[in-house]
Amino acid sequence: MNIVVCIKQVPDAQSVHFDTEKGTLVRGEAEAIINPFDLHALEAGIQMRDSYGGEVVVLTMGPPQAEDALREALGLGADRGILLSDRAFAGADTLATTYTLAKAIDRLGPVDLVLCGRQAIDGDTAQVGPGLATRLGIPCVTSVSTLEVLDDRKTMHLRRVCEEGYDLIEVEMPALLTVVASLNTPRLPSLKGKIRARKAEIPVWDAQELGAEPGRVGLVGSPTQVVSTSVPKFEARREMLEGSPEGQVEALVARLKEAGIL
Amino acid sequence: MLRVDRKKCVGCGECEEACAFEAICVKDNVAVVDPNVCTLCGACVDTCPEGALEISSNSGEADADLDLWRGVWVVAECRGRALAPVSLELLTQARGLADRLDTALTAVLMGYEVGSESQRLISYGADRVLLVEHPELAAFIEEVYGNILADLVRKERPEIILAGATAMGRSYIPRVATLLETGLTADCTGLDIREEDRALLQTRPAFGGNLLATIVCPRHRPQMATVRPHVMKVGVPDLGRKGEVISISPKEELLKHRSRVLESVKEQAEGPNLTEAKVIVTAGRGLEAKENLALVRELADLLGGALGATRAVVDAGWVSDRSQIGQTGVTVSPKLYIGCGVSGAIQHIVGMQGAEIIVAINRDAEAPIFNIAHYGVLGDVKEILPLLIQRIKKERG
Ligand SMILES: Cc1cc2nc3c(=O)[nH]c(=O)nc-3n(C[C@H](O)[C@H](O)[C@H](O)COP(=O)(O)OP(=O)(O)OC[C@H]3O[C@@H](n4cnc5c(N)ncnc54)[C@H](O)[C@@H]3O)c2cc1C
Ligand SMILES: Cc1cc2nc3c(=O)[nH]c(=O)nc-3n(C[C@H](O)[C@H](O)[C@H](O)COP(=O)(O)OP(=O)(O)OC[C@H]3O[C@@H](n4cnc5c(N)ncnc54)[C@H](O)[C@@H]3O)c2cc1C
């Protein structure tokens, strides 16, 4: 089974803390990690390969240092990593991102399964998975929480999580799935894996290598543009209610009545 | 490219602080950008007091055809045969946008035996309803819904399309945007019109709510956005309002699909679901034991709200992961959030900071959640919750 796992390097939210003076969330020394959901996608890919054979290729589009994310994935058990990197890719919105990822996957040859995280914790759009599937011309199932390959090895049964429960879905392969955290528990890297990862060669594909049209990648190929940004302010909201437990409860009820909730 | 105007830059370092990626720093009194790290998010551009930073894109000139696209569309969402609440929120918001653009508002209603909802869409502001009904649409399939919507858009050319940022919307609207090769802004919490060029200003939180970005789609049509449920207000329906209902039967070729829904399972017992609830009472590890969850449930029921949970509680197996709020769970913005024994880890906060009123019950005065709580109650949840439940019952008589 040929499996492609798309991973994104993101800043670690752990390094964010709250600045009470300014009333904002501040990002500290932002360490880069693999997007948490993508570790679950990778784990699913590795398990499938171990059951059915084939290989797991990890793919990321990002700056040169995104290579670290690929090495980490190799340490966890991926077979190969490919870095899509070119200054022309910078500033890509999801439409340009999926164009670039699709070009790379086409270049890899036939795939049976493409796995993505449900969403990246920085950009947070959850649009790359469904958009990529559309470009590849394969079906997409989002927010997958359980996964089973049927005996024909061409069909899968999946649970798709939604607001009110879940749908049980049957899908033909090749397909693209975006996964949620409850799908599995990602493994830790093995020593052997780490050594292999350190030595592994990671090819870098740029726009030319991909045969990408210059007008369709990066900022230039992105229909959406960020025109302004702001850091949300939290009002000075902190009020510690005072007194005995009964007194505090009384005060809380009064506040909630004032707000029209009770 | 992010460009620094060296004549204007005074090396104050505001940009360095604003950058979440350490992509810009001051060297020898002038800001220097590392283009390999810069994501072109624009945070620094806005903070620069000298106006020395600029993001330039060399993308082509304005598309002459933009004027061919007119009208605002709302994609209605049906769960089974009933409209999802977010559809009414969208109509209310979209009515205002359409009025400012002096154009018509259309609702697209897809499903099977859903036509009876058409009048409701009209009463909330739609001028016309495009009703697409077919047995194949009874269950939601991304490919089919996406193909039909993209086909309608190509024919009718609306300038704006809004859909709910729900599980359903987020799974197939990106397909539509990709088929149409246009921009899609995710999970918006604010929408506005820039009058001079009719552009839709789309505001959305990113980086787990740490940044609010306003996004436009200047050269492509339609301008598409998914909108977070429960953020926009629902208007008052005008039951006598008249509108047109146009029935459309989808072409066979659009109904082809390679996935199907075998079964839809409702997991939630009763009460509102988490993302749409007005009140959420959240269980944290400070409840200490699974039995105490009953207190949280009781309070939630009493307030007509839903039960939420931290990841610690989900990991302990007390509740299913569908209740998890936060970075790897769902994002909620209820009127009232009550955290019971919740510490306020950043990964949790990013999922609930949009709540109108945040109440925290915790026995540790130093718990970080008190930093963002409007009202803090210091005490043992096992003592406070029964008191609160009793007191509210008394209030209700
Ligand atoms: C403040 C801000 C707001 C933005 N808002 C929008 C917006 O509304 N609409 C829009 O189109 N773009 C937007 N973007 C751009 C968007 O963040 C990028 O296009 C990004 O490359 C992909 O989107 P995402 O991070 O949301 O990924 P998601 O779609 O949330 O990611 C889902 C999955 O796709 C895969 N994936 C994502 N990115 C990569 C990658 N680079 N390489 C390999 N796999 C990947 C991973 O498996 C990931 O788990 C915004 C950017 C910023 C800085
Ligand atoms: C990549 C990643 C993603 C994550 N995503 C999420 C996410 O989406 N959502 C999420 O919630 N977490 C997430 N987490 C976990 C998060 O970091 C915290 O561990 C978690 O939110 C803590 O849950 P808690 O507040 O219930 O427990 P704790 O942090 O253990 O806090 C318990 C609190 O209860 C108080 N307490 C104890 N006993 C009592 C009592 N009797 N009465 C009153 N108060 C009491 C304590 O003072 C303490 O403040 C994530 C972590 C990582 C690394």
Image: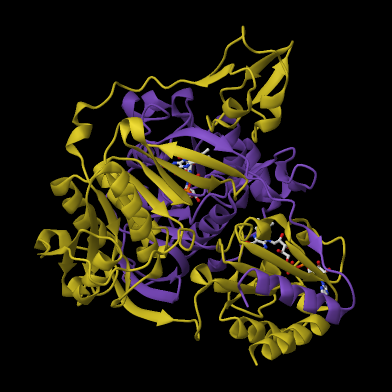
Chain colours: A purple, B yellow
Residue at x 53% of width, y 44% of height: A8
Residue at x 38% of width, y 74% of height: A167
Q: Is residue B304 above or below residue A37?
A: below
Query: Could you say which quadrant of the image residue B220 lies in?
Result: top left
Residue A42: give x, y in percent of width and height: 53, 55
Q: Is residue B282 left or right of residue B266?
A: right
- Answer yes or no: is residue A48 visible: yes
**Near-viewer residue (A70 or B182):** B182
Q: Is residue B216 left or right of residue B117?
A: right
Residue at x 67% of width, y 48% of height: A13
Residue A169: give x, y in percent of width and height: 35, 72
**Near-viewer residue (A207 or B340):** B340
Residue A66: give x, y in percent of width and height: 58, 36
Q: Is residue B209 left or right of residue B393?
A: left
Residue at the outermost bottom position: B397
- Answer yes or no: is residue A134 visible: no
Q: Is residue B23 left or right of residue B139?
A: right
Residue at the outermost right position: A244
Residue at the outermost top position: B7
Residue A143: give x, y in percent of width and height: 45, 63
**Near-viewer residue (A169 or B189):** B189
Report the number of numbered marks: 0
Query: Could you say which quadrant of the image residue B3 lies in?
Result: top right
Which of the image's four quarters has the C terminus of chain B?
A: bottom right
Residue at x 73% of width, y 46% of height: A23
